[in-house]
Image: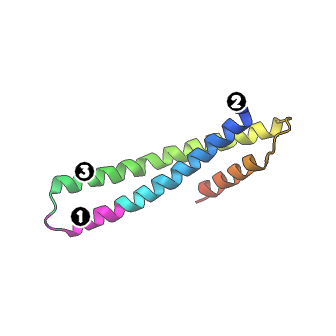
Amino acid sequence: MAPTQLEIKERALKRLCKEEKFYQKELEDQKEHVKKLEADPSVDSYDLKKQIEVQQDTERLLPELYKKIREFRDDLEKFLESYEGTEDLEPAKAAIAEADILLSK
């Protein structure tokens, strides 16, 4: 059976929240990696520069990701306000709560 609109919206929001956790972890790991490279005098300056660029790319990506999370969260909330079906709404409400926590940081 094909997923319903509610399931699609809920899963999309959950996926974005999961991506945010992944990128936060990646950013922390990259920061540690850059620190180690900076402390090592034998590291090629080009390699260090490239690793700093990777870190900066991740940092630039996060604000856009938060914007998408907010959009998907608001869309799901509006959908729930007018929803008249019989599906369980608790997973969708939990996804909204998780998004709220991420956005409040």
Residue at 50% from the left image edge and 43% from the top image edge: 64
The answer to which quarter of the image holds residue 37 is bottom left
- Mark 1 highlights which residue? 37
Which of the marked residues, 2 or 3, is nearer the chain's N terminus?
A: 2
The secondary element bearing badge 2 is classed as loop
Residue at 76% from the left image edge and 36% from the top image edge: 79
Instruction: In the rendered structure, find residue 2 and report the number of the disc placed on it.
Output: 2
The secondary element bearing badge 1 is classed as helix
The answer to which quarter of the image holds residue 3 is top right
Which of the marked residues, 3 or 1, is nearer the chain's N terminus?
A: 1
The way the protein has been coloured in the rendering is rainbow
Region of the chain picked out in magenta, as a range? 31-42
**How far is mark 2 from mark 3, CA to CA?**
44 Å
Amino acid at pointer 1? Leu
In magenta stretch: residue 37: yes
- Mark 3 highlights which residue? 50
